Image (cartoon, rainbow, N blue to C red):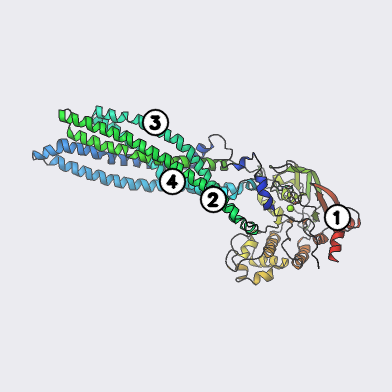
Amino acid sequence: MTAPPTAPPATADDEREPEVRAKAGDPFDRDVLPTPPRATSALLRSLLAPMKARVALTSFLLLLQQAAVQAGPLLVAYAIDSAVPAFRDDRHGPLIAVGVTYLLCSVASGGLQYAFVRASARVNQDVLLDLRGRIFRHAQALSVDFHERYTSGRLISRSTTDVESLRELLNEGLQELITVILSFVYISAMLLWLDLGLGAVAVASFLPLYLLVRNYRRRAGRVYTLRSTAIAAVIVKFVETMNGIRPVRAFRREAANDAEFAVLNKRHERTNGDALLEMARYVVGSRLVANTAVALIVLWGAYRVAGGSLELGVLAAAVLYLRRLYDPIDRLGMFLNSYQSAAASLEKIAGLLAQTPSVPEPVAPRELPPLESEHPGREVVFDGVRFGYRTGGEILPRFDLSLPAGQTVAVVGSTGAGKSTLAKLLARFYDPTAGRVLLDGVDLRDLSVPELRRGVVMVTQEAFLFSGTVADNIAIGRPDASREEIERAAKAIGAHEFISALPDGYDTDVRKRGGRISAGQRQLVAFARALLADPAVLILDEATSSLDIPGERAVQRAMSTVLHGRTAVVIAHRLSTVEIADRVLVMEHGRIVEDGPPAELIAGTGRFADLHRAWRDSLA
Ligand SMILES: Nc1ncnc2c1ncn2[C@@H]1O[C@H](COP(=O)(O)OP(=O)(O)O)[C@@H](O)[C@H]1O
Ligand SMILES: [Mg+2]
């Protein structure tokens, strides 16, 4: 027996999509989506706004802590110049006081540091929690058309590496920055107060340091943007390859993929190296400036101590302060690093969050009118619909169609005719560019999301299963369904037998060992899910393509009961499906070229009659 010819040879959607995505000039090819000006700083503000009080508190803790830390050298100066001479004169009080104060300052600084780390960790955790939640909710709310263009690898890289780099900035970077600024202010004030001349030399060294920092910032900024784009490319390639592991195997793409991955990986490594090099230049430069300043001050100070115009204790304190002054400059570089990568990441996240769904929820949602008969079907009308995908030309040029409630319509036509596009418009994955799609007279754009989901359900050949049990997967159609209802739906569709044979029956986890089920069985689960959802309009887009012929027959028998009374659009993979239809539409190039009851079309001389004759012959 020869297999019946498949009416339209099906192509997997995923094979076409990379080409579509790669169209030149698509902003989605870049990592940073077009972002409104200042979206990044607005995002940062909106993240921190709810925690203003806590941010202020943590900053205050740091201020106190720095005061305690920077008291040290001053106490040393006092000890050398006053307390020790007093001790020699048998007055022990001052030295004891200095020792006790020093100890208290150390304890206080430790305690304050602890309080600060705790408080700031809480703030940071809340900010990151909020941000990850926002990315997830927003990405989920964006329309199908967004996800077709923005790869899942990019989304993963947004919510992992990009959030992570913000975490680094918040956890370490900001503390570094505030510490550096505070110690600069405290220490310069102290030095100037201790000795105007020495202080002035120290302050003068700030100018070359500032120039170094500015230069580093500019150069590192470029390097960091390149680096974060490079790491995102690595992740995207990784995710894409693993998602498509079956075609990779089937077409022996491994070697080519290895080579492509090696290039991306190498590019990432190189950008990393560049970043380290910039950092090294900065560190060397800043140390040179710092050491020169210290050498000058020690020389000049020693000369003055010898001449009697400067006290030894003051010089000791000045040198101690200088060490503390220049130490954090390396750390300032670290801060700039984390700042640069966080800024680059935040910009990408802001770009993602600035995307608006192209299929928005209605501002004033309308309800569907109550059903008149006991049948669940509703009338469907395509009223002057025109549609084209964003990345291509017009697919449906002015499309009019009216399906009375309860009718079962089979749609046939060659691959690329626009059948799936029709289905997706009816399920409101996209909105038409002109015209309206009406469900019982209500524009789909005016229906609330729950109302639309109850109204129209689509089953495709993908038949995706979520992690969880088989029962969970069927219950997605109606989360409040009882186990009995779930089983009834499975029985109606002929899935009960294979489900019962699984290790844990309906409680088998579909992602665990033994829970692996075939593509055909997945489709049966998807049918049961749709049946349980009990929609007014059911769309089947080549939904039986993974079933064998007996399996398809069984589903078809079940379908004729399931579809009874409902409005159904069945995009037919094999012509046998057409037998349960009241009406057949033949589509070509986005237009209906034949429309009528199956018997009438078969008896005629049109395209469908030819197709049907060829099919009959092949069965004989
Ligand atoms: N997501 C998409 N983005 C851009 N073009 C698409 C997309 N999906 C389908 N197309 C194009 O729309 C046309 C109709 O496709 P489709 O409706 O899937 O046809 P059918 O289901 O009849 O095989 C084809 O030319 C196809 O390349
Ligand atoms: Mg299709």
Q: How many angstroms separate mark 3 from mark 1 (CA)?
A: 78 Å
Q: How many angstroms separate mark 2 from mark 1 (CA)?
A: 51 Å
Question: Please, what is the three-letter code of the amino acid marked with disc 3?
Answer: Leu
Q: How many angstroms separate mark 3 from mark 2 (CA)?
A: 38 Å
Mark toward the start of the polypeptide (3 vs 1): 3
Circle 4 — which element? helix
Circle 2 packing at 10 Å, graded few (<14), some (14-19), many (20+), is: few
Mark toward the start of the polypeptide (4 vs 3): 4
- Asked whether disc 4 touches disc 2, contact meaning CB atoms under 8 Å apart, the reply is no
Q: Which residue is mark 4?
A: 168
Q: Position of residue 130 (x, y in %)?
A: 50, 47
Circle 1 packing at 10 Å, graded few (<14), some (14-19), many (20+), is: many
The answer to whether the residue bearing label 3 lies less than 8 angstroms from the nearest atom of ligand 1 is no
Q: Position of residue 414 (x, y in %)?
A: 79, 52
The answer to whether residue 196 is left or right of residue 55 is: left
Mark toward the start of the polypeptide (4 vs 2): 4
Q: Quadrant of the C terminus?
A: bottom right
Q: How many angstroms separate mark 1 from mark 4 (CA)?
A: 64 Å
Q: Nearer the viewer, residue 422 or 488?
A: 422
| In front: label 4 or label 3 | 3
- Asked whether disc 3 touches disc 2, contact meaning CB atoms under 8 Å apart, the reply is no
Question: Please, what is the three-letter code of the amino acid marked with disc 2?
Answer: Ala
Q: Which mark is residue 262?
A: 2
Question: Please, what is the three-letter code of the amino acid marked with disc 1?
Answer: Phe
Q: Position of residue 558 (x, y in %)?
A: 76, 65
Q: Is residue 482 above or below residue 372?
A: below
Circle 3 — which element? helix
Circle 2 — which element? helix
Q: Which residue is mark 3?
A: 211
| In front: label 4 or label 2 | 2
The answer to whether residue 577 is left or right of residue 300 is: right
